[in-house]
Image (cartoon, helix red, strand yellow):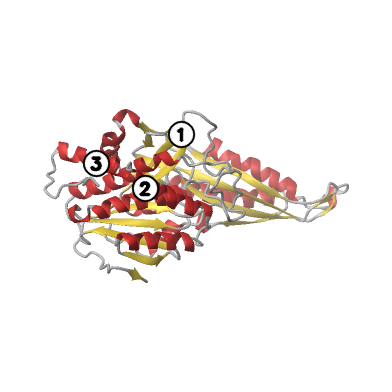
């Protein structure tokens, strides 16, 4: 196999530019490509939900053992943190999420899910395979790394805040920067998309129970109608964005759940509504949360009802914001691999991503890896028809390995007390 790094490497532009190209050549070799595809398909067939990724974690640890990569396990129930390089500063992290979604797969193919009601419809199986591919290349060149690469295999990204738990349990202790990718069928293969600053919104979920007094629909004067109250609440909540938010400060409040009553002629005792809210700054997010609770409670009281509002704290994600210096580093590396004309500066999106916990704690960079084919239907993430284009794997693995390697070469030592890691450290 070619050696992407030379032990005599100097920091001249030509030498740095060659590293990503060598990693791409390495990752395109049939034995590396086939190995990544095989790993992805094993995970795809045996998908697991958040904090239940025991078999996925076992597979990852087995591959790390075969490569001789030390790791810590468990972190955040099923998470794995591996270490490649000197074991000393600087430290740079690469992250892949592992969990599946609670949906039924509707794609008929040889490696369809063997687990009813669960599906890798967001590409996390591909993320794990590409990070393991990067790990194989980095381990092959471990003696030339000018620091330590930290491999973050994270559980429970899908609404369960696995990143927050990993952070709380010390997964990023002493780490200076972190990178992550996400496959997307909205961008052509051979292209990437990202931006400096906010890339995805802060998000949260809420539920409210509005209590009234039920009765016969023919004599509404003897009831306190929670359906009427809930309807007024929903209309009033839309005014938070249209009349209270700065039009240049993007925010969303959406009600997606309305449950109440089961008969045409009976006014129920209570109604449950639920929804999500999003914003691109911490201040706007907290203001929205406060006003949602006020509007629901006070509008309910106008209709003689009372309301209880519950915010799902586990689902609260901060703004995912890309560090400007890391974005420039990403542009240089991606430009060498893909060509600068294949880097898209995207608009921020309202979707949430718990990588935000990492990028809020230390400098982070999150980007999208295109896998759209020229022909065929496009099914976005969280669709039961979602497909992964496995031809993208060499690009993802090479980007991971190149981002970490060149970051270590270009950044001086910052910390003096690295964590001690044995050959295998199972906590």
Q: Element under label 1?
A: strand
Report which residue position mark 2 lands on. 180
N-term mark: 3 or 1: 3
* Foreground of the two, 39 or 421: 39
N-term mark: 2 or 3: 3
User: Quarter of the image holding residue 182?
Assistant: top left
In the displayed structure, does residue 340 sit left or right of residue 271?
left
User: Which numbered circle lies on residue 22?
Assistant: 3
Percent of width and height locating residue 338: 31, 33
User: Which numbered circle lies on residue 372?
Assistant: 1
In the displayed structure, does residue 254 sit left or right of residue 261?
left
Q: CA distance from mark 3 to mark 1?
A: 24 Å
Q: Nearer the viewer, mark 2 or mark 1?
A: 1
* Foreground of the two, 325 or 84: 84
Q: Nearer the viewer, mark 3 or mark 1?
A: 3
Residue visible at 45% across and 66% down? 77
Q: CA distance from mark 2 to mark 1?
A: 19 Å
Number of numbered discs overlaid on the protein picture? 3
């Amino acid at each position: 196999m070619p050696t992407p790094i030379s032990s005599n490497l100097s920091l001249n532009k030509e030498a740095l530019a060659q590293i990503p190209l060598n990693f791409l050549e390495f990752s395109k070799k049939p034995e590396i490509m086939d190995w990544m595809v095989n790993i992805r398909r094993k995970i795809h067939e045996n998908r697991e939900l958040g904090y239940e990724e025991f078999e996925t974690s076992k597979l990852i640890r087995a591959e790390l053992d075969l490569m001789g990569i030390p790791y810590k396990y468990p972190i955040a129930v099923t998470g794995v943190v591996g270490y490649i390089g000197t074991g000393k500063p600087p430290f740079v992290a690469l992250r892949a999420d592992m969990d599946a979604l609670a949906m039924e797969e509707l794609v008929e193919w040889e490696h369809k899910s063997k687990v009813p009601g669960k599906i890798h419809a967001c590409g996390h199986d591909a993320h794990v395979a590409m990070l393991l591919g990067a790990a194989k290349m980095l381990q092959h060149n471990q003696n030339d790394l000018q620091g330590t690469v930290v491999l973050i295999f994270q559980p429970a990204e899908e609404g369960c805040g696995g990143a927050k738990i990993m952070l709380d349990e010390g997964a990023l202790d002493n780490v200076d920067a972190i990178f992550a990718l996400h496959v997307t069928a909205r961008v052509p293969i051979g292209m990437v998309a990202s931006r400096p600053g906010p890339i995805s919104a802060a998000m949260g979920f809420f539920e409210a129970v509005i209590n009234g007094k039920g009765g016969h629909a023919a004599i509404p004067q003897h009831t306190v109608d929670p359906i009427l109250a809930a309807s007024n609440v929903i209309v009033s909540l839309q005014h938070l964005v249209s009349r209270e938010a700065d039009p240049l400060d993007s925010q969303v409040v959406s009600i997606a759940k309305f449950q109440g009553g089961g008969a045409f002629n009976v006014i129920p005792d209570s109604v449950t509504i639920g929804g999500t809210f999003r914003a691109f700054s911490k201040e706007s997010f907290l203001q929205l949360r406060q006003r949602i609770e006020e509007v629901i409670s006070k509008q309910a009281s106008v209709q003689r009802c009372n309301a209880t509002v519950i915010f799902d704290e586990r689902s609260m994600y901060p703004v995912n914001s890309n560090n400007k210096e890391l974005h420039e580093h990403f542009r240089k590396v991606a430009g060498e691999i893909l060509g600068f004309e294949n880097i898209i500066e995207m608009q921020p999106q309202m979707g949430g991503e718990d990588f935000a916990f990492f990028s809020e704690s230390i400098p982070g960079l999150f980007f999208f890896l295109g896998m759209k084919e020229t022909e065929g239907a496009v099914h976005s993430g969280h669709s039961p028809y979602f497909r992964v284009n496995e031809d993208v794997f060499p690009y993802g693995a090479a980007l991971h390995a190149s981002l970490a390697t060149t970051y270590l070469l270009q950044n001086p030592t910052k910390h003096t007390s690295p964590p001690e890691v044995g050959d295998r450290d199972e906590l």
